[in-house]
């Protein structure tokens, strides 16, 4: 079976434009071989080359005193003290999860875990950010079940707890769900490994599972939109094997405790091709591969297939020459494949042999730094005019605000997500101090007194209405969530999910979102140390809403000093930090009750945001506060109800702002935190707020078994809890 | 009454982690003669009274929709009329 | 006094168990690779939770044939203390060191959450620090935790006090609603006739530290280490 | 070469939560004619060259030891000689 001739159709099928192909011809000075065409196509795919996003991502701040490794490696690294670093990153697996939810989500977890342990860090936690379509569609239910089971199936088996995340629903995801997974690991600061080849003559070693025909062209698939009618390309489903990955994790960490290793990288998208090329690129060397040595699952695989396979649970590493036997012994011990498949060479090129012949020889630079990079045209979308206006007159005030509160609490986006996270082992590793369901998760770092607080956030509706402010709000909220546990935000990773970059309106959204994130990070002093871009999230030309997912990692010096969960003491004063304005734009309430997605998202004043965060953190650090809870989707009404769920203790509250009652209860003004504090400490907290310049009002007291917001709402806590606890099952899963 | 047996197996070329683990376990147990294992599902369904042809076509539907995952699995159905 | 924690390929609570033994109880603990064939020098053995061999085929089915399991069988036969937690329990069942079997949770879903347990037998080496009838809170995390046994076996277990823990309400009532996985008789843990082998689905190692907000799991480790200390003082530990 | 097929099913009287779930799902999908479902495992093994009788007895051993749990599962083996 010979290679197909290089035709126009074949070039197109590889997602390469005429111009790009012309560049390949010029670079090689000849026609590429079939294998070379495959290599160019995956390396120049949007997924691997970031060709539409690179020029924009540069605008993100990526340095800071804690940063040990910024973007450009498999994951970002920040210093967390005591000689340790946190290694973290987020990845999307949107397209594969839409096609086969279980395996797509499972292999997504597998991929991000490898990104973390490839750097020498033992993963200690995952968080998942999920977006599904209309809950009324049977397919949504099927996808939710499959994705959640897939994340659970992989993460649980690996023994990495999934400690938090988000899960929401909107019809814009009917044809493109989002599955973004964040992972963090911890390593000694002086034992961080990089994806770098070095040392001419050093062996290039393949470890893990055998290579099969799975996922060939996964990277190009992630760079194309789906066509109407079909449920996506059918040839690329990869099946995950978490058991093998667990062995791979242990074997890699064992290897990393020796001094055999020079560089290592997982084989993710574009498999052997991207791992070898990227390692060579970072080390400014070349790599020569002999494909006859690659462990195969099926006989007769062509060099093209071997180079492009996306079989899971594989890593490529460069070891010191002469230490091959030690490396082999470790991987054999763990029953894994291990084979020397090549050498580091001085000439900066990738040379691939198969059956004795050279089947590809390409310079490294044009595949990495020199890959195409586009400043694609951007244009402000027309819809923005239409959705900007929101006239208060259009929004009728509900007659029964208590009933509205119950309805909101039970709506899919606000309801309890226990059905999801109870399928995740969130305690394995015995580090999880604050379990899923809080503003952020909290993990202790063994061997120290420290804790890591983790939160992921993103509000697609805000980003739809105003991409820049929506993105900034996401940064603010994720940071605020971490602060609600008393932690200091240290760094950010993101996952940017968008439609086709070839559409100028999408490109505009993207550029605005990057600016919004950059602004938020600058204002809060946070570096973006890693991230991921997922374009082409559209079906039949209908794109998803622009959806950046922001993850913030925060550090708590003393993990035992974290806040309580919910109201816990009868009689405690309830304080509100920040201020409630008449802002209904983009709220969950407008959408759920009035079917409206309009108006501008809430304003964001950075001075106020910082003052609120500072006050909260300082008050927690001094032990003045029992719980602190961020006020976000669903507004103050929902935030207060959420505070009652733990203990069942209610509250009586009086709100005095002279604004529309629905805005008062359900508006989503930014920069607000609800606190309850022991009576004796209320004055000190108020004084702290004054010093910081944060508005702080005593709005009521904890107590009773009802949530009373004077003149507006008077409902039993048990009714709130019931609506909230059963909402997901009732409205999404229909059980 | 109709009894149907449905056999679901991983598609050729698709990774079968279970099969791989069972193969290694058998070999470690001394069954070196075993060269390959694929692990799938076996389902027995009891259906009410209905013509065989209809049963077959209904079963094929059930497999496509629920019993098998056609993206990664093959299936086979046997139908038998009982009593 | 030395506790061995067995590491099967796919074990993932091995480090957690060793951590509690070493850091919380200052006891000596060693990880024992599944290819070891001897348990000489250990005073007790823990089979930890996780997904040995990916839980492929049946949970614990493949691990049961690991070389070390021959040694575990011998160790148990001679009266050595063997504790199986979650996947370790499943492995002990597959190895027939404990009676009965596990099938998938009736919800077919993996479940991770705190449950309440009523201590039914406080005379075993693993529960002697507890009070019978007391309610403990511990987390479970499993997909195959529905314990089943034939009626005769069940009867015997009940009659001989081999049921050590039962799922219950916070008040200690054994009800259907308090049963997270469908286990017969709400059984969460059983011991061998001689009492020296215990299998339990809940994870005591996940709730043995103040910082994790729950210390109910200390019961198991305090009992076990207390027993070992007592026997070693008495000089009976000479075994092996 | 010997091809063996192993069918493992939950013993009668043993809980089969998976079967129950599949039955409910099928009925909810409109397949009201389905009255009972049992879900088991189906394994295909490829063995090297060995006499059929020996293959059978070796396979029975593999089932007793590993492939099935005789406490809760029944098994059946089919052996076929290929090429
Ligand atoms: N949105 C982003 N913000 C910051 N860095 C990013 C972003 N997207 C990608 N990066 C960085 O670009 C590099 C390449 O991305 P990566 O997702 O690792 O590629 P691959 O999917 O092939 O592993 C990584 O270092 C990553 O952290
Ligand atoms: Mg990567």
Image (cartoon, coloured by chain):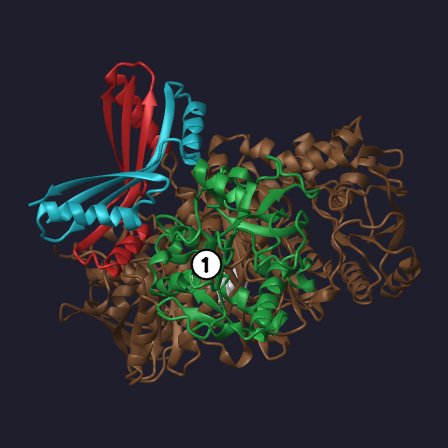
Chain colours: A brown, B red, C green, D cyan
D18 vs A79, left or right, is left
Q: What kind of element bears circle 1? A: helix
* A584 or C226: nearer the viewer: C226
Q: Which residue: 28% across, 64% down?
A: A24
Give the residue at mark 1.
Answer: A158
In the image, is residue A152 above or below residue A390? below
Q: Residue C168: x percent and y percent?
A: 63, 42
The residue carrying pointer 1 sits among few (fewer than 14), some (14 to 19) or many (20 or more) residues within 10 Å by Cα, namely many
Image quarter (top left, top right, bottom left or bottom right) of the N terminus of chain A: bottom left
Image check: A479 left or right of A625? left
Q: Nearer the viewer, residue A620 or C162?
A: C162
Note whether D44 is above or below A54 in the view shown.
above
At a point 78% along the width and 41% down the height, the residue shown is A637
- Of residue A655 and residue C151, the one placed in the foreground of this image is C151
Name the residue located 31 percent from the left edge and 75 percent from the top edge. A329
Task: Tell me which chain the residue with mark 1 is part of.
Answer: A
Q: Position of residue D14 (x, y in %)?
A: 40, 34
């Amino acid at each position: 079976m010979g290679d197909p001739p290089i035709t126009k159709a074949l070039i197109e099928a590889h997602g390469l434009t005429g111009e790009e192909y012309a560049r390949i011809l010029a670079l090689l000075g000849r026609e590429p071989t079939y294998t070379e065409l495959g290599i160019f196509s995956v390396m120049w795919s949007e997924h691997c080359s970031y060709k539409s996003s690179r020029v924009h991502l540069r605008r993100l701040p990526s340095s800071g005193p804690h940063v040990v490794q910024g973007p450009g490696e498999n994951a970002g690294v920040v210093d967390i003290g005591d000689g340790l670093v946190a290694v973290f990153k987020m990845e999307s697996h949107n397209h594969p999860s839409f096609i086969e939810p279980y395996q797509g989500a499972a292999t997504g977890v597998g991929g991000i875990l490898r990104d973390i342990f490839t750097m020498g860090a033992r993963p200690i936690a995952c968080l998942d950010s999920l977006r599904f379509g209309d809950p009324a569609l049977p397919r949504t239910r099927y996808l939710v079940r499959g994705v959640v089971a897939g994340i659970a199936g992989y993460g649980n088996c690996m023994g990495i707890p999934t400690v938090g995340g988000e899960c929401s629903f909107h019809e814009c995801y009917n044809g493109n769900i989002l599955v973004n997974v964040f992972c963090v690991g911890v390593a000694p600061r002086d034992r961080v490994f990089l994806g770098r080849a070095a040392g001419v003559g050093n062996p290039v070693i393949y470890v893990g599972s055998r290579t099969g025909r799975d996922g060939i062209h996964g990277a190009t698939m992630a760079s194309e939109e789906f066509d109407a009618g079909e449920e996506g390309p059918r040839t690329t489903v990869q099946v995950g094997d978490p058991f093998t990955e667990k062995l791979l994790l242990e074997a890699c960490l064992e290897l990393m405790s020796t001094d055999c290793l020079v560089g290592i990288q997982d084989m993710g998208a574009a498999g052997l091709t991207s791992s070898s090329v990227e390692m060579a690129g970072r080390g400014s060397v070349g790599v020569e591969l002999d494909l006859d040595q690659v462990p195969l699952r099926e006989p007769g695989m062509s060099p093209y297939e071997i180079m492009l396979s996306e079989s899971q649970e594989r890593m490529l590493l460069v070891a010191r020459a002469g230490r091959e036997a030690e490396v082999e012994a470790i991987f054999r011990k763990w029953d894994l494949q291990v084979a020397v498949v090549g050498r580091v060479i001085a000439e900066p090129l990738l040379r691939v042999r198969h059956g004795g012949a050279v089947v590809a020889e390409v310079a490294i630079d044009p595949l990495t730094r020199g890959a195409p990079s586009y400043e694609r045209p951007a244009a402000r979308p027309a819809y923005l005019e239409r959705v900007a206006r929101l006239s208060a007159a259009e929004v009728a005030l509900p007659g029964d605000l208590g009933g509205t509160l119950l309805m909101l609490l039970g709506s899919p986006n606000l309801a309890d997500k226990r059905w999801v996270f109870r399928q995740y082992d969130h305690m394995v590793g015995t580090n999880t101090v604050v379990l899923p369901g809080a503003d952020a998760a909290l993990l202790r770092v063994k061997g120290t007194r420290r804790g890591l607080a983790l939160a992921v956030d993103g509000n697609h509706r805000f980003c739809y209405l105003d991409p820049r402010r929506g993105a900034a709000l996401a940064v603010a909220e994720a940071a605020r969530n971490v602060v609600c546990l008393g932690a200091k935000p240290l760094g950010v990773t993101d996952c940017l999910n968008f439609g086709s970059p070839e559409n100028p309106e999408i490109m505009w959204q993207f550029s605005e979102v990057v600016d919004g994130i950059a602004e938020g990070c600058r204002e809060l002093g946070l570096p973006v140390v890693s991230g991921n871009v997922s374009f082409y999230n559209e079906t039949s030309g209908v794109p998803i809403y622009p959806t950046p997912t922001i993850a913030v990692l925060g550090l708590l010096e003393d993990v035992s000093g974290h806040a309580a969960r919910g109201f816990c003491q009868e009689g405690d004063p309830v304080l509100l930090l920040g201020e409630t304005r008449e802002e209904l734009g983009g709220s969950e309430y407008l959408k759920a009750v009035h079917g409206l997605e309009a108006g501008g998202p809430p304003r964001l004043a950075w001075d106020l945001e910082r003052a609120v965060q500072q006050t909260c953190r300082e008050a927690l650090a001094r032990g003045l506060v029992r719980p602190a809870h961020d006020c976000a989707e669903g507004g103050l009404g929902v935030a207060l109800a959420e505070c009652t769920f733990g203990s069942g203790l209610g509250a009586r509250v009086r709100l005095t702002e002279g604004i529309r009652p629905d805005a008062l209860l359900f508006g989503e003004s930014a920069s607000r935190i609800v606190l309850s504090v022991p009576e004796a400490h209320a004055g000190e907290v108020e004084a702290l707020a004054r010093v910081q310049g944060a508005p702080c009002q005593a709005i009521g007291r904890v107590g009773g078994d009802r949530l009373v917001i004077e003149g507006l709402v008077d409902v039993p806590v048990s009714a709130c809890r019931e609506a909230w606890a059963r909402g997901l099952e009732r409205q999404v899963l229909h059980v | 009454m109709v009894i149907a047996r449905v056999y679901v197996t991983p598609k050729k070329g698709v990774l079968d982690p279970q099969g791989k683990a069972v193969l290694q376990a058998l070999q470690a147990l001394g069954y070196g003669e075993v060269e390959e294992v694929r692990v799938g599902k076996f389902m027995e369904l009891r259906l009410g009274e209905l013509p065989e042809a209809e049963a077959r076509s209904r079963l094929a539907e059930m497999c496509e929709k629920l019993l098998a995952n056609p993206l990664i699995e093959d299936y086979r159905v046997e139908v038998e009329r009982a009593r | 006094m030395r506790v061995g924690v067995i590491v099967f390929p796919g074990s993932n609570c091995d480090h957690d168990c060793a951590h509690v033994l070493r850091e919380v109880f200052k006891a000596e603990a060693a990880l024992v690779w599944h290819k070891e064939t001897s348990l000489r020098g250990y005073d007790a053995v823990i089979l930890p939770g996780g997904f040995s061999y990916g839980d492929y085929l049946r949970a614990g089915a493949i691990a049961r044939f690991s070389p070390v399991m021959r040694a575990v069988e011998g160790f148990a036969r001679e009266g050595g203390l063997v504790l199986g937690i979650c996947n370790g329990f499943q492995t002990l069942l597959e190895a027939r060191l404990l009676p009965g079997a596990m099938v998938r949770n009736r919800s077919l879903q993996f479940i991770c959450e705190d449950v309440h347990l009523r201590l039914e037998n406080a005379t075993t080496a693993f529960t002697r620090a507890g009070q019978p009838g007391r309610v403990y809170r511990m987390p479970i995390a499993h997909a195959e935790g529905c314990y089943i046994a034939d009626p005769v076996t069940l009867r015997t277990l009940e009659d001989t006090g081999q049921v050590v823990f039962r799922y219950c309400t916070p008040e200690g009532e054994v009800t259907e609603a308090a049963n997270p996985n469908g286990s017969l008789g709400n059984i969460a843990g059983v011991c061998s006739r001689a009492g020296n082998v215990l299998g339990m689905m809940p994870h005591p190692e996940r709730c043995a530290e103040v910082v994790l907000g729950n210390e109910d799991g200390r019961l198991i480790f305090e009992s076990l280490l207390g027993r070992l200390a007592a026997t070693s003082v008495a000089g009976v530990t000479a075994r092996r």
